[in-house]
Amino acid sequence: MDPIPFPGPARPALPWHRVVLLGFMAAGKSTLGPLLAHALGWTFLDGDAELARRSGVSVPEWFRRFGEGAFRQEEARLTAELCRRDELVLAPGGGWAVGPGVLESLPHGTALVWLRVSLEEAVRRATAEGTPRPLLAGPDPVLAARRLLAAREPYYARADFVIDVDGRTPVDLTMAILAWLKTSSS
């Protein structure tokens, strides 16, 4: 992967110790996360992939076997563990932010970045990816997505930085986040 240069003459010390990427399904968290982590020289972890790796159970299988509630509990536990690390870019699942107390439990120095995607673009991306999205299963995925997004947006809106992703390239978005990290304070 070609490095994305950190904006400015040198990589500055940041007031942030970790970045958590918030956003609806298919917002680009798993695409931007590795780019951002690489540019920062940090580690990237995808919350869903890490949960599946540790448990040996895929996300759709978690939902099918144990239900969404059990998945969200395990997701919150794993995120709390991972966020004890510094120099981490974490991309939890789209519903992670609505878990009771998860946003409040993040340690000081955690930058929350909302990758805001339009409903139409999220559904287009999610259905084009071919990865099963349990919460979009059913006869009307657009209606299901609309309800989910409406319930989640108040939590996403608590982010420290909001960036609209529709029509922008991953590199452009990464550079914008890097510029914000450089000039913001925790």
Image (cartoon, rainbow, N blue to C red):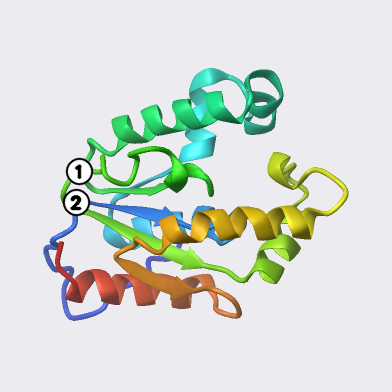
Q: Judge depth for marks 1 and 2 and give the one in front.
A: 1
Q: Which residue is mark 1?
A: 107
Can residue 154 be seen?
yes
Question: What is the crowding at mark 2: few (fewer than 14 residues within 10 Å), some, or many (at least 20)?
Answer: many
Amino acid type at circle 1 is Pro
Residue 183 point in image, percent of width and height: 18, 76
> Residue drawn 46% across and 78% down?
172
Where is residue 167, by image quadrant? Answer: bottom right
> Residue drawn 24% across and 69% down?
181
The quarter of the picture where the C terminus appears is bottom left
Where is residue 27, by image quadrant? Answer: bottom right
Residue 133 point in image, percent of width and height: 71, 44
Amino acid type at circle 2 is His
Q: Which residue is mark 2?
A: 17
Label 1 vs 2, first from the N-terminus: 2
Instruction: From this view, report whether residue 109 is shown above or below residue 72.
Output: below
Can residue 6 be seen?
no
> Residue drawn 53% across and 37% down?
48
Question: What is the crowding at mark 1: few (fewer than 14 residues within 10 Å), some, or many (at least 20)?
Answer: some
Report helix, strand or loop for mark 1: loop
- How far is the residue under mark 1 from the one under mark 2? 9 Å
For residue 125, the mark is none
Instruction: From this view, report whether residue 181 is shown above or below residue 99.
Output: below
Report helix, strand or loop for mark 2: loop
Residue 87 point in image, percent of width and height: 24, 48
Residue 142 in the figure: left or right of residue 54: right
User: Which residue sits furthest right?
Assistant: 139
Name the foreground residue: 108 vs 129.
108
CB atoms at circles 1 and 2 under 8 Å apart? Answer: yes
